[in-house]
Image (tube, helix red, strand yellow):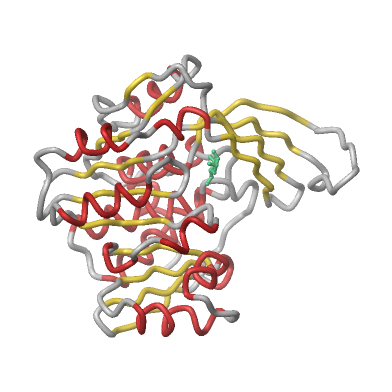
Amino acid sequence: MKVVNFGSLNLDYLYHVPHTAVAGETISAKSYAISVGGKGLNQSIAAARAGVSVCHAGLVGKEGGILVDCLRESGVDVSLVQPTSAPQGHAMIQINDGGNNCIIVFGGSNQEVSREYIDQTLEGMGPGDYVMVQNEVSNVGHIISAANALGCTVVFNASPIDSSLLQLDYSQVDWLVVNELEGMAIAGCEDIDSIIPALTEKFPELHIILTLGGSGSLCSSGGQLWKQEALPARVVDTTGAGDTFLGYCVAGLIRGDDIPTILRTATGASSLAVSSLGAAASIPCREQVMEYLAQHP
Ligand code: RIB
């Protein structure tokens, strides 16, 4: 079985601020750091640290060596990552005293993922293989439809949400992972409780994982619904917590774990991720997650 993640690779410029800046305001950062991130990269690293073999597919600009090194050091196969002359994708991240963030993403190299590159990368893949994708690379619709046509299991994290995602055919997606805002936008509803009913009415085969921040998460699959409560966390920085959750969910699916185990393990992983600074840097390995879960029965 092969797992390919078409995903963004970003340099994250982190600014610790007293509060996130509002229009017209200039504020001073208390500290600054450059870190490794991008939803795609974070999710590949989370899946790898959860114990799964994953190949990352994406493009990097000339400053992207640190990103490829971090993937490789985390056990991710980087043989599919290609160079581009486009500027490196990056994110400017304000983190406030409560650990919450405000992010500006510049796509750059991540928007160079072409249909040719996608087709070439998917060559030879088929039933039993997994394709992961988020909305920080170009040609997301083509990745989903091409992977689906080959019979791969498609895991789509509809993040960050924008209008292009409303045009996608979700019957080509197997697992959709969304937060409340993404779920409401795609389902076309205005309250959280309607997200799963509205999506399953439109796409009866879709498996859905809905993350609800401090209220835990839900999973809808094959007509059944599971709920996982949030676990205790000392919040320092929430950046990358959703990506950690998703990577651990994919690892659980691949391992064949049952849904309650998948949700609880992914929740434990994201609880640990929020307790330290940075995106990729804060993703725990499976042993740390198991130890944490044993302490929180
Ligand atoms: O989900 C967190 C990620 O979003 C950050 O690492 C940043 O790069 C943005 O893509």
Foreground residue among 88 and 275: 88
Foreground residue among 205 and 269: 205
In the image, is 129 to the left or to the right of 49?
left
In the image, is 61 to the left or to the right of 17?
left
Quadrant of the rendered image holding ligand 1: top right
Q: Quadrant of the C terminus?
A: bottom left
Residue at 58% x, 46% y is 239
Residue at 49% x, 54% y is 159
In the image, is 181 to the left or to the right of 168?
right
x then y, percent, for residue 149:
17, 55
Q: Quadrant of residue 215?
A: bottom right
x then y, percent, for residue 131:
25, 49
**Count of numbered circles in the view:** 0
**Residue 179, placed above or below residue 125:** below
x then y, percent, for residue 4:
25, 42
Residue at 34% x, 25% y is 73
Residue at 37% x, 74% y is 219
**Residue 284, placed above or below residue 213:** above
Foreground residue among 156 and 84: 84
**Residue 58, placed above or below residue 210:** above
x then y, percent, for residue 282:
50, 40
